[in-house]
Amino acid sequence: MLDALPDRVSVYEVSPRDGLQNEAAPIATAAKVRLIEALVRAGLTRIEVTSFVSPRWIPQLADADELLPLLSAPPGVTFSALCPNARGLERARASGLEEIAVFMSASETHNQKNTNKSTEASLRTFREVVSSALEGGMRVRAYVSTVWGCPYEGAVDPARALSITEQLLEMGCYQVSLGDTIGVGTPLQTRTLGKLFLSEFPQEKLALHLHDTRGTALANALVGLDLGFRHFDASVAGLGGCPYAPGAAGNLATEDLVYMLSGMGVETGLDLERLVEAGQVAEAVVGRRLPGKVHQAGVSSLRSA
Ligand code: HMG
Ligand code: MG
C-alpha cells in the first residue's frame, strides 16, 4: 500500500450545501456568504454553495435564490448547487450558475424518502434535466448515494450503483461522486467497491463522497487514493451531519484530508492554515463545536515558547 502516490488530487468542497443542509437553527444568508468567501480564500476552486431543492424539504437552503447574487466566483473558481428537477434547473439558470449537481440513491427506499421518487423516475427526470443543462452550456456533476449502505435497506447491491453511474455518465454528467451517505463504510469494503468501479470507469469520471459518521472517512479516503481515486469531496471542520443520527459527525473534514495528503507530498493547491480559518468561520456560523480533527487540534503540534 502507498507505493505509488499521485502528485496531485482535487478536492470538491461541500460544506455550504451538505454541511449546512442539516443545521436546524436558521443561518443568515450573509453568514453563508462569509463561509463561502473563507473557502475561496483557502484556495478551493470547486464549491457546492447551496441547493435548488424544495424549500419545504430543506428549509435551511431556502435562501438559495438570494444567496447566489451575493457571491462572485473569482477566475478559476466554480460554484455549483444541487438540482433535483426542471424547477431546480430553472432557478440555477436564473442565478447564473455554470454548474449543477444532480443526485439520486442506489437504494430504492432512500431515493423515495429523499426525493419522493423511484430510482427509475429519478433517471427519467435527469435525462431531461441533464440534457437541457448541457444544451444551455452548463456542466453537470452527479451523486449516487447509499453506495456503501442504506439506512432503510442495509446492504445495497453494488450492481445498482454501477448501473446508475453508467446511465448518469451516458447522459453527459462529467463526474459521478459515490456517496457513503450514512458513513457505514469500512476500508475493506471501500477497497472492494473502489476496485469494482475503477474496473468499469476511468478515475477522472469518479469521486468519493465520504461521511465520517463512524470515524472511517479518512481511512476510506486513503484506501481510495491508493486504488487510484483522484477526486474527493470534503467539508471544512467536518461540518455536516446525518439526519438519521442526530449529533453524528459530518462529512470527511477538508482539513483532515488535506493534512494527510500534504504530509505525504500529495498536492491539493489548498492552503491548510487558511482552511483552518475557514473551519473557524464555519464553527462561528453554526454556533457549535465542529468535529474535524485538524480543526480541533491545529495544524502543528509545535507551540511557541
Ligand atoms: P415533491 O414534493 O415530490 O415535488 O418533491 P413536486 O414536484 O410534487 O412539487 C411539489 C411542490 O414543490 C411544488 O410547489 C413545486 O413547485 C415545489 P407547490 O406547487 O406545492 O407550491 N418544488 C420546488 N420548489 C423549488 N425548487 C424546486 C422544486 N421542486 C418542486 N427544485 C423534490 C420532490 C425532489 C423537489 C423534493 O423531494 C426535494 O426537494 N428533495 C431534496 C432533498 C434533499 O435536498 N436532500 C438532501 C440532499 S441529498 C444528500 O445530502 C446526499 C449527498 O450529499 C450525497 C451523499 O451523501 O451520498 C448529495
Ligand atoms: Mg453527503
Image (tube, helix red, strand yellow):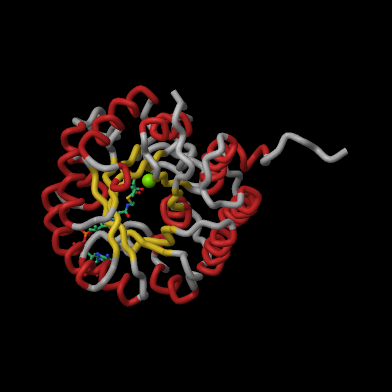
Residue that extends furthest to the right in the rendered view of this protein = 305
The residue positioned 49% from the left and 38% from the top of the image is 249
Quarter of the figure with residue 64? bottom left
Horizontal side of 268 relative to 276 (left or right) equals left
Q: Picture coordinates of residue 52 (x, y %)?
A: 33, 64
Pick whichever, 290 or 5, lies toward us. 5
Position of residue 68 relative to residue 243, above or below, is below
Q: For the C terminus, which image quadrant?
A: top right
Q: Picture coordinates of residue 294 (x, y %)?
A: 61, 39
Position of residue 66 relative to residue 114, above or below, is below
Pick whichever, 134 or 85, lies toward us. 134
Horizontal side of 203 relative to 257 (left or right) equals left
The residue positioned 31% from the left and 58% from the top of the image is 101
The residue positioned 56% from the left and 34% from the top of the image is 264
The residue positioned 18% from the left and 58% from the top of the image is 126
Horizontal side of 160 relative to 276 (left or right) equals left
Q: How many marks?
A: 0
Q: Picture coordinates of residue 1 (x, y %)?
A: 44, 23
Q: Picture coordinates of residue 35 (x, y %)?
A: 55, 60
Quarter of the figure with residue 135? bottom left
